[in-house]
Image: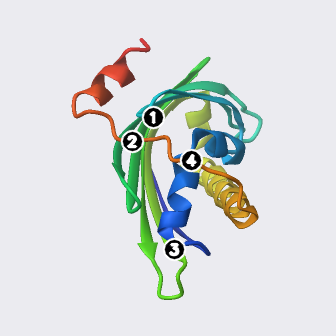
C-alpha cells in the first residue's frame, strides 16, 4: 500500500475553487496523462489515463466513484484502473481550508494498491512520479482559476450503496 499526502496553497477562496475540482472538463484538461474523461453520472467518471514511470507507460481504463462531496469543504473518490499487466485501486481525499488572506489550502491524501509491471518499479519511483504529477495538476488547475476559465460543479457523492457496485462491475 502506497500513501501520499500534501498541501497546496491556492489564491482563490474554496467557494471559487470548488467548481474547478468538480468539473470533469476542467479535470480532464488538468490531469496529467488524461486522454479522455466521461461523466457517466453525477457520481461516476470513466477515464483513460496514460501514466509513465520510467520505461513503463501503461494506459489505464479507470472507473471513479465520488464517495463524498461536501461542497465546498471536502471531496473523496475511489478509483480502479486496469491496463495490460497493470492494475491499481486508490482512494483520494482532499480538504479545502480557508486561509486568513482569502486563499485556500488544499490538503490532500491518497492510498493506492498497485500491481503488475508498474509496481515492480518500486514505491520510491512511484512516489516521485506521483508527486510530480500532483504538482503539475495543481499548477494547471491554479492557472485555469487565474484565467477565470468557466467551471461548473458536476460531481456529487454516490448513494451509500453505489460505490461497491460500480467498482466491481468492470470485472
Q: Earlier in the sequence, mark 4 or mark 1?
A: 1
The relative height of residue 85 versus residue 20 in the rendered view (above or below) is: above
Quarter of the rendering occupied by the C terminus: top left
Mark 1 to mark 2 CA distance (whole Å): 15 Å
* Residue nearer the viewer, 85 or 79: 79
The image shows residue 101, relative to residue 132, as above or below, that is below
Residue in the image at 35% along x and 19% along y: 168
Residue that extends furthest to the bottom in the rendered view of this protein: 100
10 Å crowding of disc 2: few (<14), some (14-19), many (20+)? many
User: What is the CA distance from the residue labelled 4 to the residue labelled 3?
Assistant: 19 Å
Q: Position of residue 142 (x, y in %)?
A: 67, 64
> Closer to the N terminus: mark 1 or mark 3?
1
Q: Secondary structure at mark 1?
A: strand
**Along the polypeptide, which appears first: circle 4 or circle 3?**
3
Residue shown at the point (61%, 26%) measured from the top left: 60
Q: Is residue 2 left or right of residue 101?
A: left
Identify the mark nearer the N-term, 2 or 3: 3
Q: Which residue is mark 4?
A: 152
How many other residues sit within 10 Å of disc 1, few (<14), some (14-19) or many (≥20)?
many
What whole-number distance in Å separates the C-alpha atoms at marks 2 and 3? 21 Å
Q: Residue 162: x, y in percent?
A: 29, 27
Label 3 SS: strand
Residue 2 visible in the snapshot: no
Q: Quadrant of residue 98?
A: bottom left
**Is there CB contact under 8 Å for labels 1 and 2?**
no
The answer to whether 151 appears left or right of 66 in the picture is right
Mark 4 → mark 1, Cα distance in angstroms: 22 Å
Q: Which mark is residue 156?
A: 2
Q: Is residue 18 left or right of residue 137?
A: left
- 33 relative to 164, above or below: below
Amino acid at each position: 500500500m502506497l500513501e501520499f499526502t500534501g498541501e497546496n496553497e491556492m489564491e482563490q477562496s474554496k467557494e471559487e475553487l470548488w467548481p474547478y475540482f468538480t468539473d470533469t472538463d476542467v479535470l480532464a484538461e488538468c490531469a496529467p496523462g488524461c486522454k479522455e474523461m466521461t461523466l457517466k453520472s453525477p457520481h461516476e467518471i470513466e477515464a483513460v489515463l496514460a501514466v509513465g514511470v520510467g520505461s513503463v507507460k501503461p494506459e489505464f481504463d479507470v472507473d471513479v466513484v465520488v464517495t463524498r462531496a461536501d461542497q465546498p469543504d471536502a471531496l473523496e473518490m475511489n478509483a480502479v484502473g486496469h491496463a495490460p499487466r497493470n492494475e491499481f485501486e486508490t482512494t483520494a481525499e482532499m480538504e479545502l481550508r480557508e486561509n486568513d488572506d482569502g486563499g485556500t489550502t488544499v490538503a490532500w491524501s491518497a492510498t493506492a494498491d498497485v500491481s503488475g509491471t508498474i509496481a515492480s518499479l518500486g514505491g520510491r519511483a512511484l512516489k516521485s512520479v506521483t508527486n510530480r504529477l500532483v504538482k503539475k495538476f495543481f499548477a494547471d488547475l491554479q492557472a485555469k482559476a487565474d484565467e477565470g476559465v468557466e467551471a461548473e460543479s458536476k460531481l456529487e457523492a454516490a448513494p451509500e450503496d453505489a460505490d461497491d457496485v460500480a467498482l466491481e462491475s468492470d470485472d
